[in-house]
Image (cartoon, helix red, strand yellow):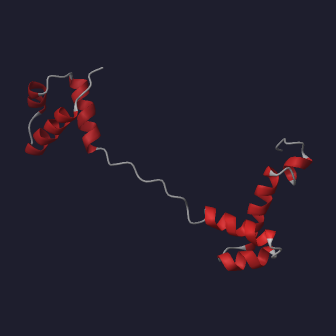
Amino acid sequence: MDRISDTERQRIAELLAEGAPVWRLHEEINRSRYAIRRAVVALHRPPKREPRRSPLRLSLAEREEISRGLAAGEPVREVARRLGRAPSTVCWEVARTAAGTGTGRARRTGGRSG
């Protein structure tokens, strides 16, 4: 497989910007047509997006706040009100993390789901 160097990629970009035909790319960059095609496609590909969590998901800070609130003996509804979240969301998080500590559904089913 032909590897195209950074300088060759830069030259391909320059030639494409000038509107050079494909045969000129092959002439100036002594690589296979497949390697040049991969480089051209990569130049036109949009950059990868940064992964973003949905605002519907709880952040790590919110999870910690839930943990602190419950450890302090606050009711779930009070923690939810302070976070600006639905009480069901906080309950869901509590149930989800309780499964990891060996309580709740995971313990009742012996670690099996279903």
Q: Is residue 56 left or right of residue 31?
A: right
Give the residue at x 55% y 61%.
Answer: 54
Residue at the right extreme, as displayed? 108
The number of numbered discs placed on residues in the rendered structure image is: 0
Quadrant in which the C terminus appears: top right
- Decide: is 43 above or below 81: above
Instruction: Specify the quadrant of the image occupied by residue 22.
Output: top left
Give the residue at x 70% y 73%.
Answer: 86
- Decide: is 32 above or below 101: above
The residue lying toward the viewer, choosing from 46 and 74, is: 74
Quadrant in which the N terminus appears: top left
Q: Is residue 63 left or right of residue 107?
A: left
In the image, residue 99 lies at what x, y percent? 81, 52
Q: Is residue 57 visible?
A: no
In the image, residue 24 lies at what x, y percent? 8, 30
In the image, residue 83 lies at what x, y percent? 66, 75
Give the residue at x 50% y 58%.
Answer: 52
Give the residue at x 28% y 32%.
Answer: 38
- Decide: is 11 above or below 56: above
Instruction: Specify the quadrant of the image occupied by residue 84.
Output: bottom right
Instruction: Specify the quadrant of the image occupied by residue 25.
Output: top left
The residue lying toward the viewer, choosing from 19 and 90, is: 90
In the image, residue 63 lies at what x, y percent? 68, 64
Q: Is residue 21 visible?
A: yes
